[in-house]
Image (cartoon, rainbow, N blue to C red):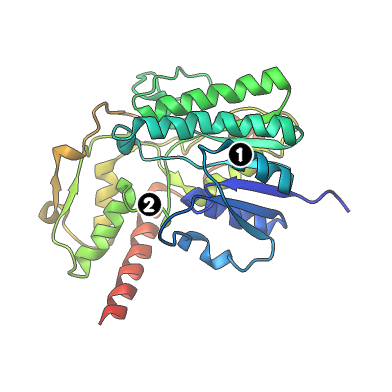
Amino acid sequence: MGKERVALITGITGQDGSYLAELLLSKQYKVVGCKRRTSTICTERIDHIYEDPNLILEYFDLNDSSCMWKLLSKHKPTEIYNLAAQSHVRVSFDVPENTVDGVALGTLRLLEAMRHIVPNARFYQASSSEMFGDNPEYPFDEHSRLMPASPYACAKVFAHNLIRNYRESYGLHVSSGILFNHESPRRGETFVTRKITLAAARIKLGLQDKLYLGNLEAHRDWGYAADYVKAMWLMLQQDHPEDYVISTGETHTVEEFLHHVFDAANLDPQKYVETDERLFRPHEVPYLLGDSTKAQEKLGWEPKTKFKKLAELMYNSDYEKVKGETNETF
């Protein structure tokens, strides 16, 4: 019998955390899910695996070093996936201190706890394509210049550099996944893709009249979150820790996503969609396109879900969700 595999996931109730937990449970891991305390129940993304005997939920906060030391001492994880963050880029301009403290110093606190308590564990850091910011020299790979254009992105650069520093300084098995935009039916409702699919469903069912959006010309490299969490796991199975770009290698505008969704709903966006200047970022990232050649060659990973299919599956999920809620109301 091999050593029990124990994975600790910060941010388990988020989109990525829920898909990753499913994947690891299917591989017979014991999964320790770390979540913030909230006044309302926010575990809907993991309710379907809540009864799994290998899933343990613990309270956690990025700003609390003591809980990190306690949880690592208690569970002795063999793998740590640091996914927790205030991850809304636009909101980071409104709450910059909170965002930076959690993303940057939260990662530092967790790395410090790891190197003292479980130095032989393997650590995954959720880096972000937002770190490339308004760098015009795309496509971006692991060596591209980082030019962050938001407090969130600046904090992610700090955390990303910490990974290299701790890897080189202490010989820890720590890796960063530079994930480009990845979406799913579990995406938060304030993110533009989910905002579009949910609005289309509500408009189709006669529950909403208008959809207000910001910059429709922003280009993003969009993939499917369920595909991307597999890359996270693969990184920690390698003999040597490294950083990897995870992307589709295609870029599309917000307007293209909008049209695919409204086509799926058989709706004309010109009748329902309006631009609201208040939704623009103070510093826009105009163009994101990733080069995931390294991940394909070293990890054997590649994206499975195409852009149009992603838009359609998200819309269909939201249509069924809204329809079900409407039927319950009446």
Query: Where the N terminus falls, by quadrant?
Result: bottom right
Where disc 1 sits, the SS reads helix
Asked if one can make out residue 139 in the rendered structure from this viewpoint, the answer is no
Query: Where the C terminus falls, by quadrant?
Result: bottom left
Q: Residue furthest right?
A: 1
- Name which residue type carries label 2: Gly
Residue at (64%, 44%) from the top-left corner? 233
Count every numbered label the image shows and give the total.
2
Res 154 quadrant in image: top left
Residue at (23%, 28%) from the top-left corner? 282
Horizontally, residue 247 falls left or right of residue 295, namely left
Q: Residue furthest left?
A: 271
Between marks 2 and 1 in the image, the one whose residue lies nearer the viewer: 1
- Name which residue type carries label 1: Ser
Asked if one can make out residue 322 in the rendered structure from this viewpoint, the answer is yes
Residue 322: image location, x then y, percent: 30, 69
Q: Residue furthest bottom?
A: 330
The correct choice, above or below, for 260 with respect to 168 in the image is below
92, 146: nearer the viewer: 92
Residue 65: image location, x then y, percent: 58, 36
Residue 188 image label: 2
Residue count near mark 2 (Cα–Cα under 10 Å), binned few <14, some 14–19, many ≥20: some
264, 220: nearer the viewer: 220
Residue 196 image label: none
Q: Which residue is mark 1?
A: 66
Residue 61: image location, x then y, percent: 52, 43
